Amino acid sequence: MYSRLAKCHKWTLRTAAIVATLMVSAAVSPVVLAEQGDVGGRPANPDKNNSRSSDIFIYDLKPGGARTDGALVVNNTDKTKTVAIYATDGIASNTGAMTCRQQVEPREAVGSWITLDKAEVTLKPRSRQVVGFTINVPAKVDVGEHNGCIVYQVKDQEAVTQGNLRIQTRSATRVAITVPGKLHKNVDITSLEFTRKDSSHNYELTLKNTGNVSADTITTITLDGLFGRNYFKNFGQYPALPGESLYINYTNDKLPVWGGFYWINGSIKYDTRPGTFGVLDKNHITSKTADRKLVFVMPHVYILIGWFILLVALLTLSFIAYYRHKRREDALRNWSNHTIKLGETLRSIAAKQDVDWKYLAKVNDIKPPYDIKSGDKIKVPKKLPASPRKKVKIQ
């Protein structure tokens, strides 16, 4: 599947020879694969006016029409390789992505239209060879796009064992044949879903192509703040096959550390002209958006700890403030009035009342420099009556 827009024009096919499907990937073209030390293939005669024809065999053929072409098979390893070459039908996987049938499965569509000049080639180290083939379209065939694959598989390769399966890798090139007629391209977003996985999100965008030709759709997923700031963006170009649904998944493992509420947005755009593969003309682009979703993101654990410490501090300060306020209110309600006499100070009054002079100032809302004058009235604690002295009998 396509992973990044920069890689969206590169088609390869990888799968297990015993497993039922062969997924079309978008990592790199077969030539690049070969340069990385692998064996692969690509169209031998790409159209210079269509960049996608370097990765896909693209043809417009009428019913009963024929076409000859060639596949360039490349061996960029340091060993001689014998490569089996065969054609298969193209089908949609359970996710709607392009896959190829296995060699042992019956060829009922495009795979049966292709006749290869050779079933295998032996390539010396760092060499390449063109294998010719002919396409014969049946006289009775539906209007629209039909997909198949030309597959390249190294013979006698060592299989990788995974559990009860023996996995062998192969690669392939997509063959897209468009039969002219009433062609139409239409892709809609049917859903935008997300799931939480520990400290990450998984976003799934579901597309439905109701047309009879594929559409290379550029999909975009974003995670945005309530005020528009973007925190996550991922995009790619994916082929939505005619009549099929396509399920596209993105994983976001870099959630906002502060947490909170965020919008998940999904959108697509594609060229509406039939027969265009990966081409975007501003005069023919259509864009569609999904209904956005509001989600809550948990803060990072360290942020949660920080918030907890802050909450405890705020609660402590609030309690202290409440206690002081209540103490002052109680003092104002229960203390008695005192008229300041000439020569008295807060310190002298506080000493007589057996109370801290700063507390006395705070209760009476007296600010620095704590000046008071004769005749002012303040609140002071009520004096408790003196305890009667016990008479001591002297004998």
Image (cartoon, helix red, strand yellow):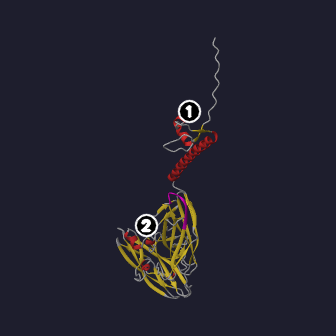
Ranked by sequence position, the earlier of labels 2 and 1 is 2
Q: Position of residue 347 (x, y in %)?
A: 52, 36
| Secondary structure of residue under mark 1 | helix
Q: Is residue 111 visible?
A: no
Q: Residue at x 57, y 47 (%)?
A: 318
Reply above or below: 49 against 218: below
Q: Position of residue 201 (x, y in %)?
A: 53, 62
Q: Nearer the viewer, residue 234 or 173?
A: 234
Task: State if disc 1 and disc 2 touch (CB < 8 Å).
Answer: no
Reply above or below: 252 against 336: below
**Magenta stretch: residue 257 in it?**
yes
Q: Is residue 190 left or right of residue 9?
A: right
**Magenta stretch: residue 196 in it?**
no
> Which picture quadrant has residue 316?
top right
Residue 205: give its label.
none
Farthest residue, direction top? 395
Looking at the rendering, the stretch of residues picked out in magenta corresponds to 255-264
Please state which of the two labelled residues, at mark 2 or mark 1, is closer to the viewer.
Answer: 1
Mark 2 = which residue? 157
| Secondary structure of residue under mark 2 | loop
The Cα atoms of the two marked residues, 2 and 1, are separated by 103 Å
In the picture, the quarter occupied by the C terminus is: top right
Q: Nearer the viewer, residue 231 or 102?
A: 231
Q: Position of residue 79 (x, y in %)?
A: 36, 68
Q: Is residue 358 visible?
A: yes
Reply above or below: 360 against 36: above
Number of other residues with Cα within 10 Å of mark 2, as a class: few under 14, some 14 to 19, many 20 or more: few
> Which picture quadrant has residue 194?
bottom right
Number of other residues with Cα within 10 Å of mark 1, as a class: few under 14, some 14 to 19, many 20 or more: few
Residue 352: give its label.
1
| Type of amino acid under label 2 | Gln
Q: Position of residue 282 (x, y in %)?
A: 47, 81
